[in-house]
Amino acid sequence: MTASGKVCIVGASGKLGQYMVQHALDRGYEVVGVCREQSVRKLDRFKDRIAVIPGATDDREVIERAVEGCGEVLVVLVPRGVHGYSTGTTQAVLDYSRPGARLVFSCGWHITRDGKDVYSWKLKTIVKIGGPLARLARFADLDDQVEACRRIFQSDTRWTVVRGSDLEEGESQGLPVWSRHVGDPILASNITRRVDFALFMVRALENDELVHEAPAIVGCQTPSALADAAT
């Protein structure tokens, strides 16, 4: 099955973004990619196959131009810097995407929608200690990503927030499996191929069952996923 339509990929030049571009092209989408001007060259292998709009992804004018005419929007939420980068990107996408557009955002497991996620001590330590250190160094702000997702959850758009486990490179293993809460046994392996995270994002555009869901994903060939499938 192939898809058709025009999709905007915000953050197209990153590792996850480039995989999403390829998956979207493979499924027949017309692709508009948004990335910082200094990263445009990373998309050279897609030259003549996609439209690229250079600029900061939290620049409202850039986003307004990029999402025009797009029925679907994929967004990589990056907590870059300490000036509300993720929140600015998110708000622009929410404001300028056309009514009824399908919006799919990526983030980490540390985001919770209903407070029912159960986190490992390792992840809690990273968020509790690593988050403030990253902000102090003016490198990243995890709270910015939290605020961005809060705005998504409260919006009346057709959104999905895909929460990724730890990521690794490698050949595709297939579409990841998901659960509503971190801590569920199916997610215990806590690893997903990055190419498959991107696949889940693109396929989510076509899955109405994921509208207003925040799926936490894990690789379909991981021990915890296989154990769940065997029960």
Image: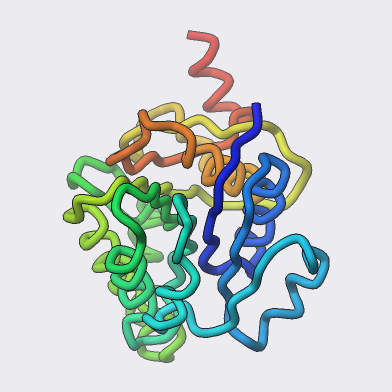
Which residue in the rendered view is the most extreme toward the bottom? 137
- Tell me what residue is drawn at x 64 percent, y 48 percent: 24
Which residue in the rendered view is the most extreme toward the top? 231
- Tell me what residue is drawn at x 19 percent, y 50 percent: 156
Does residue 134 show up?
no
Q: Is 194 above or below relative to 92?
A: above
Q: Is 183 above or below relative to 90?
A: above
**Would you identify the image quadrant in which residue 143 lies?**
bottom left
Q: Residue 25, percent across and down?
A: 70, 49
Q: Closest to the observer: 133 or 80?
A: 80
- Tell me what residue is drawn at x 40 percent, y 83 percent: 61
Q: Closest to the observer: 174 or 121?
A: 174
Q: How many marks?
A: 0
Q: Is 193 above or below relative to 3?
A: below
Q: Residue 51, percent across and down?
A: 66, 68
Q: Closest to the observer: 20 or 120?
A: 20
- Tell me what residue is drawn at x 61 percent, y 31 percent: 222
Q: Residue 192, percent across and down?
A: 59, 43
158 to the left or right of 156: right
Q: Residue 208, percent across and down?
A: 38, 32
- Position of the N terminus, as image quadrant, is top right
